[in-house]
Image (tube, rainbow, N blue to C red):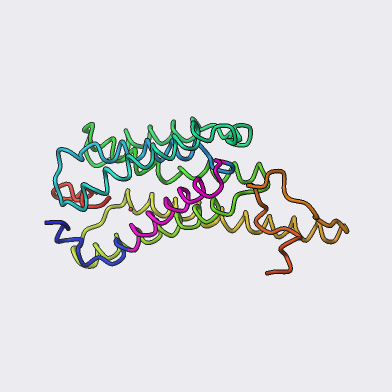
Amino acid sequence: MFFANSSASNVYRWVGDGLHIFAIVILLVKFYVRKNSTGVSGKTQLLFALTYTARYLDVWTNWVSYYNTVMKIFYIIISYFIVYLTLRVFKETYNKDHDSFRIEVLLIPVTLLAFTINYESTFMEISWAWSIYLESVCLVPQLYMIWKAKTSDFYVILYVLFMGLYRGLYIANWAYRYKMDGYVDLISITGGIIETFIALVGFLCVISQSVTNALSSSTNGKKVTGRPESVYVVPLISSECKSKVDAVGKPNAHHLSV
């Protein structure tokens, strides 16, 4: 069958998957329209690629449904494709200086957590737990890049927002599964809460910073008459536009979700 029976009626999962795909499409549209990788964190995209690779190692060994298998393969392929676009195709516009967050600060604790807090001490389960912990912090380099550059492409901001909304819907997905099946996955829920918090709070902080910068510029009597440093990097809010205003169960239940 195309869908897993336990998931066919879970609207939260469908909407969550839809938001995830939409966030990915936003980045692809940016590459197509802007013809650059300005504002995109190659480190964040690499972390997502590692996340999906580790999580979906069972893609050829654990059959759930056509949908489940197709989505797993899609996430793996598209994540590496985005890394390729960011770091190779549009490498001339990739700002390495701003994308300077030290990802070992994330990888070391995530790896320690995966080996100490998991459901089974097997390679597949440790890899799965590692992917959940890692995904929860994948957006940190992207948010750091936005903060350091003080400007960001509008598509990148939308991407961050919809990635946060996608994880928020997956928290509702786990709540729905608990209500319907009495099943709870604390690792997935905790990871989802952390990622949602990072994405949405980071998004609000960037917006707040942009408003503050715009107001400060206005009160100092400055008037922005030209474009930003790059025609493809735009302030979220500038003085020009101010006026216009995704477990382990019995058995392996976490493989039901992508």
Q: Residue furthest right?
A: 221
User: Which one is in front, 72 or 166?
Assistant: 72
Q: Relative to 168, is 57 above or below?
A: above
Q: Is residue 202 magenta?
A: no
Q: Return the x and y of residue 95 as percentages of the image width and height.
A: 61, 35
Q: Is residue 23 magenta?
A: yes
User: Which one is in front, 15 or 248?
Assistant: 15
Q: Residue at x 41, y 57 (%)?
A: 22
User: Which one is in front, 215 or 125?
Assistant: 215
Q: Residue furthest left?
A: 1
Q: Relative to 223, is 70 above or below?
A: above
Q: Residue at x 42, y 52 (%)?
A: 25
- Place residue 149 in its image quadrant: top right
Q: Is residue 125 left or right of residue 213?
A: left
Q: Residue at x 50, y 45 (%)?
A: 31
Q: Residue at x 42, y 50 (%)?
A: 24
User: Which one is in front, 61 or 205?
Assistant: 61
Q: Return the x and y of residue 38 as percentages of the image width and height.
A: 59, 42
Q: Return the x and y of residue 244 as percentages of the image width and height.
A: 70, 69
Q: Is residue 26 left or right of residue 113?
A: right
Range of residues picked out in magenta: 15-37
Q: Return the x and y of residue 130 as percentages of the image width and height.
A: 34, 38
Give the main secondary structure of the magenta stretch. helix
Q: Where the N terminus falls, by quadrant? A: bottom left
- Place residue 5 in its image quadrant: bottom left
